[in-house]
Image (spheres, rainbow, N blue to C red):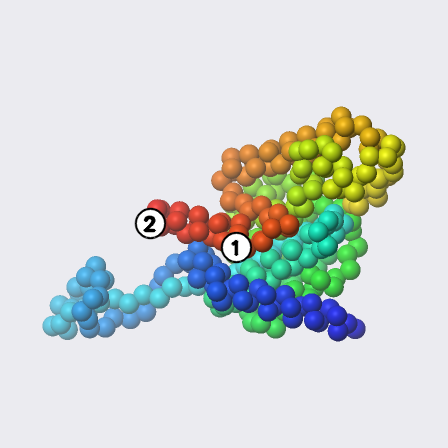
Amino acid sequence: MISRELIKKVKKIEIVTRHYVQDTMAGQYHSVFKGRGISFQEVRQYQIGDDVRMIDWNVSARMGDVFVKLFVEEREVTVILVVDVSASTFFGTRGFAKRDVIAEIAALLSFSAIENNDRVGLIMFSDRIEKFIPPKKGRKHVLRVVLSLLSTKTAGKKTDMGVALDYLGKVIKRRSIVFLISDFIGRGYEEQLKLAARKHDLVPIEIFDPREKSSNPEDLSRERGIIPMGLILIEDPETGEVEWLDSSNKKVIESYSTLLKKEEVERGEFFRKNKIDFISVDISKPYMDPLIKFFKLRAKRSVIRV
């Protein structure tokens, strides 16, 4: 039974994200993800303003008049959302969790896709595949995707992107646009990610809380809820492991911060080395800013290539 509260939340996300789509995203999305190419449609008589390069000289000679070829864009684009729903996505320190932002971004990308008559599918994962919704078109289908992201009770707690990317390769055979949305906690997924990037147009979207990346030891301890009060017990939300942490020791907190920063740098270098475009979203700021920046850079690059 779906609660009224959940339905209201889905409706609110639809209203917010559709507003963004209609104002900004639909055109950006279309200009970046153009489909598989163009196909010949028909010929018609030349009209003033037509591109002379499109003149069909054979038909023109046969008909005794000037005719041009008309082409249409083959969209048939499939968008697959590969979404991390592990325990760490429940973390959040601004009154909402990373998972809330993930759901809104997924909705935004989905509504942008159906606005362009594209299909949308969903793979939810933790350390296993939690749910798969095959790609389809239409508003009702997108609402089902959003509802699943908000309501599905997950069995796993850890993150295993390798499992998700392997599954993607099995169920999605044709080249698609794949948005991998995660906080990227964990390692060991690099080879599967490279393979997926070769087959699909893969765009990783990293979701993070700024308090996870603070370089100030005191700030990090305070903002993560680690109050300097000596030895405290902390629990890893994904593994369930509990250990003692000396919250009064700045060196301990600082080493933790350094480790997080090192992982972030290595991840960025890996994406750049493999020519994988990626987006980083700070949940304390408007998520539209990094998304629009990404689409503008992609569009500019497409123009340069042409």
Q: 120 left or right of 234?
A: left
Q: 236 left or right of 98?
A: right
Disc 2 residue type (three-letter): Val
Q: Find the distance from the CA under tag 2 to the CA under tag 1.
A: 20 Å
Whether tag 2 and tag 1 are in contact, CB under 8 A, the answer is no
Q: Which residue is mark 2?
A: 306
Q: Nearer the viewer, residue 245 or 177?
A: 245
Above/below status of 202 relative to 12: above
Q: Nearer the viewer, residue 106 or 177?
A: 106
Disc 1 residue type (three-letter): Ile
Q: Secondary structure at mark 2?
A: loop
| Quadrant of the rendering where the N terminus is positioned | bottom right
Q: 241 left or right of 215?
A: right
Above/below status of 225 relative to 57: above
At 65% across and 64% down in the image, what residue appears?
A: 146
Q: Position of residue 268 (x, y in %)?
A: 57, 37
At 71% across and 71% down in the image, what residue appears?
A: 7
Q: Position of residue 5 (x, y in %)?
A: 75, 70
Q: Which residue is mark 1?
A: 177
